[in-house]
Image (cartoon, helix red, strand yellow):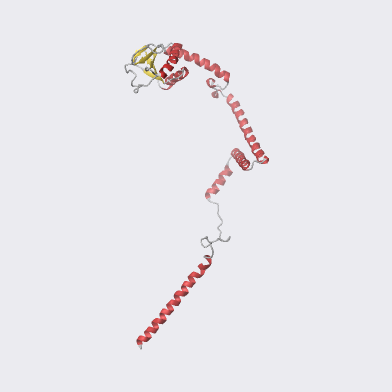
């Protein structure tokens, strides 16, 4: 009798447990069933206007606005003109109507007028102060032409004086086309400024009307690979050697290189 009663109680408890689990499942699924309808189940929850947060200005944006308001008047004017021109340019680029193009052109004209006025007044102001005038770097064509003549005469005197203590050696090789092309240029340069000129080669023969000397490796430190042609300035005592041209250069380029060496590396004049 006791066993039969115990079985009935257990059966009742199982039935009750099943009913409770079913109710719990139904209550969990009910609110989700609606949100799973159609293809919008993955959408985020729509926020009603009341729920939307009103963005408060950050400290950075407030600071930027304050800075813009604190700009001097000239800065505001220039920025405003630039912004208006940029906007007009983009509008005309997107829709090149007559009105849009004219707006851009008028703003460009305004900017050009400001630039022209600035340039004219800048030159006028600089003219009042001698510190801004360099006679050797004058912009006028006639002035530059005369200055070049003056510089040429000055360089002639300097190189003629240099030729009294320095000579030229052109390092060449047999069958070297560049050597044959460069030799007449060097010969003319030497004659113009009074330099003694020698052509150094392995066999020591004369080269393109230049007296030859045998190359015994005296310039190997400047030319370890023995390429040619190379032009050297050589002190009369033979203790100083300065390369002034590697490969073919014009007479003017040789002079420029000598001037650079004189200015930056070694006082020659």
Compared with residue 38, is residue 222 higher up or lower down, i.e. above or below?
Answer: above
- Taking the spot 53% from the left edge, 67% from the top edge, the residue there is 34
Q: Nearer the viewer, residue 12 or 83?
A: 12
Quarter occupied by residue 161: top left
Could you say where residue 6 lies in the image, as x and y percent from the top left? 37, 84
The reply, left or right, for residue 81 in relation to residue 205 is right
Query: Furthest residue to the bottom?
Result: 1
Outermost residue, front side: 175
Q: Tell me which residue sits at (51%, 70%) in the image.
A: 30
State the image coordinates of residue 7 (x, y, percent, origin top left).
Answer: 37, 83
| Residue situated in front as seen by the camera: 229 or 221 | 229
160 to 101, vertically: above or below = above
Residue at the left extreme of this rendering: 216
- Where does the image place residue 80, in percent across and percent down from the top left? 61, 40
- Classify the position of the N terminus by image quarter: bottom left
Asked if residue 78 is positioned above or below residue 12 in the image, the reply reads above
Residue found 49% across the figure and 14% down from its top: 154
Camera-side residue: 132 or 25?
25
Q: Is residue 33 visible?
A: yes
**Residue 237 in view here:** no
């Amino acid at each position: 009798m006791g066993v039969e009663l115990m079985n009935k109680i257990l059966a009742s408890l199982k039935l009750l447990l099943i009913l409770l689990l079913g109710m719990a499942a139904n209550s969990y699924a009910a609110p989700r069933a609606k949100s799973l309808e159609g293809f919008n189940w993955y959408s985020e929850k729509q926020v009603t206007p009341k729920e939307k947060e009103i963005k408060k200005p950050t400290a950075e944006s407030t600071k930027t606005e304050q800075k813009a308001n604190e700009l001097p008047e000239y800065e505001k004017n220039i920025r405003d003109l630039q912004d208006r021109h940029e906007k007009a340019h983009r509008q005309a680029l997107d829709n090149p109507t007559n009105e849009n193009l004219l707006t851009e052109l008028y703003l460009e004209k305004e900017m050009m007028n400001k630039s022209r006025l600035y340039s004219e007044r800048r030159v006028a102001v600089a003219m009042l102060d001698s510190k801004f005038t360099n006679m050797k770097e004058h912009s006028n064509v006639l002035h530059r032409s005369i200055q070049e003549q003056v510089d040429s005469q000055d360089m002639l005197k300097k190189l003629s004086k240099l030729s009294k203590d320095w000579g030229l050696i052109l390092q060449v090789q047999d069958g070297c086309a560049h050597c044959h092309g460069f030799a007449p240029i060097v010969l003319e340069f030497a004659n113009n400024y009074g330099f003694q000129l020698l052509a150094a080669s392995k066999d020591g023969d004369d080269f393109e009307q230049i007296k030859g000397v045998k190359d015994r490796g005296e310039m190997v430190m400047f030319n370890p690979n023995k390429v040619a042609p190379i032009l050297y300035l050589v002190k009369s005592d033979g203790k100083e050697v300065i390369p002034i041209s590697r490969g073919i250069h014009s007479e003017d380029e040789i002079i420029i290189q000598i001037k650079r060496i004189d200015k930056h590396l070694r006082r020659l004049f």
